[in-house]
Amino acid sequence: MSGERRAAGSRARPAAAPIPPRCAPGPRSPRQVCAPGLRGRRGPGLVARPREGGGGARALGWGTASGAGGRAGAAASRRCGMAARPPSSRSQRTTGSTCLHALSELLGLPLDQVNFVACQLFALFAAFWFRIYLSPGKTSPDVRHALVTIFGIYFVIFCFGWYSLHLFVLVLMCYGIMVTASVSSIHRYTFLVAMGYLTICHISRIYIFHYGILTTDFSGPLMIVTQKITTLAFQVHDGLGRRAEDLSAEQQRLAVKVKPSFLEYLSYLLNFMSVIAGPCNNFKDYIAFIEGRHIHAKLLEVNWKQRGFHNLPEPSPTGAVIHKLCMTLVSLLLFLTLTKTFPVTCLVDDWFVHKANFLTRLCYLYIVMQASKPKYYFAWTLADAVNNAAGFGFSGVDKNGNFCWDLLSNLNIWKIETATSFKMYLENWNIQTATWLKRVCYERVPWYPTVLTFFLSALWHGVYPGYYFTFLTGILVTVAARTVRNNYRHCFLSSRALKVVYDVVTWAVTQLAVSYTVAPFVLLAVEPTISLYK
């Protein structure tokens, strides 16, 4: 409603109102086209509701309609000579701890975001301490399980207060299913309960209780816990309820043949390394990490002695952690500059939609979508670094004999930015969620696996209409990309020059197609999405 009142107020202004010099008619860059429509209002239909993404980036809530988009819109207004509106008191609200309120005021950031980042930084130091002083050789697995669980529960309560009860309720319900349901149907019951509870929470927090006024909320960790709960249920079903010959090689490797104890279950779901920002991981890998078998098991998987790597030193995550922290810092700097310089609100500005030429709109769409990525790079890379600092995430040895710590990596930035196909892009974006979707849906459903997998992805993310626009468009783009690649790619392989041309063209088309597909995901609501499509 506030957006409508501002819009109405903007329309009520006299037609002859002076235009600030930077907004004067004439050639405009993509950075300037948003100015007229941002003078004192939001874009059409862009109500102040929450943001969503996935895992840690979703918890950060930066860069969407009501998060950084709104604040960036205010910044754009200031660039056009408008006085800045005072920050809303809502920006300092949180359901969690308020002990960092003074720091929040000092930094000018919402308190819930400050709490989130503070927890992740504390988790990073705790992870180093855990690996050095509570290594498997110094303490028992039960002690390690207990401590990571206690820390995880504390972090959740610190960030989300009594709303963290939603996580505990879901965990307890699904453990009840784990110990009482038959192994032939345990995966079905668990999946229905976990996804049903998550969906109810999505609906209630947005449309009933309007909890979405905050930029971080409990649904982010709840989404991660849902992934882990369902992953474990399917792996227990594979290990105890199916014959080995009916399983794929990967399913056999990950199958769990003994139901976890209550402590193991809590530790897997609520450990401090991943409870706030993920990522999802496999139960057998996690238990091997707690018991000190993780690195040796991965080295055996790659036959490291037969490949001549038996003289290598003990793998240390320090180098990988430092590298990922540097990437985290760069991502944060890019967010603080790009995301606020190119606000998403411009995509639905009246001037931009109705008067900007097609090339301008296309270029700005690409720029805005690029500017929305650093928040995901920041959250996911920091979460990966936390797990590595604890000693979890070792994946083996590459062909050059270098140790790899990317078992839990959620993205490959280089492959994302250089992707020449929609498939390649998706395979390197939110990797652990894509793996979860493949293992619990795509590989198991008998009909329409692509459609059902996209639908599950949308349902898991939330109930905003923009998500379903994105995933419906994604289905069409996926099918079209496969058809074009299968029918025309071979025509460009006859010479190196043609192959280079093909790669450049497919890179540009892929990046623009992703930007077009993902835009509704950022806009959330129906009206701005339709306005953009027009």
Image (spheres, rainbow, N blue to C red):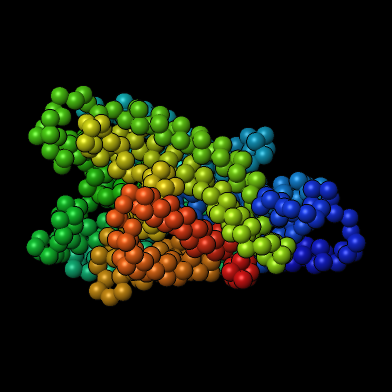
As drawn, which residue projects farthest toward the bottom?
447
Query: Residue 293: x and y, percent?
Result: 19, 37
Residue closest to the eye, 255 or 4: 4
Q: Residue at x 38, y 40 (%)?
A: 384
Task: Tell me which residue sits at (44%, 56%) in the image.
Answer: 505
Report the quarter where the C terminus lies.
bottom right
Screen quadrant of the N terminus: bottom right
Residue appearing at x 42%, y 47% in the figure: 418
Q: Is residue 231 left or right of residue 226?
A: left
Left/right of residue 103 with respect to residue 311 in the rendered view: right
**Position of residue 423 measured from the top left corner of the image (x, y, whole percent):** 36, 58
In the rendering, at what x and y percent does residue 271 appear? 36, 43
Quadrant in the rendering for residue 412: top left
Q: How many marks?
A: 0
Q: Is residue 529 shown to the viewer in this render?
A: yes
Q: Is residue 384 left or right of residue 357?
A: left
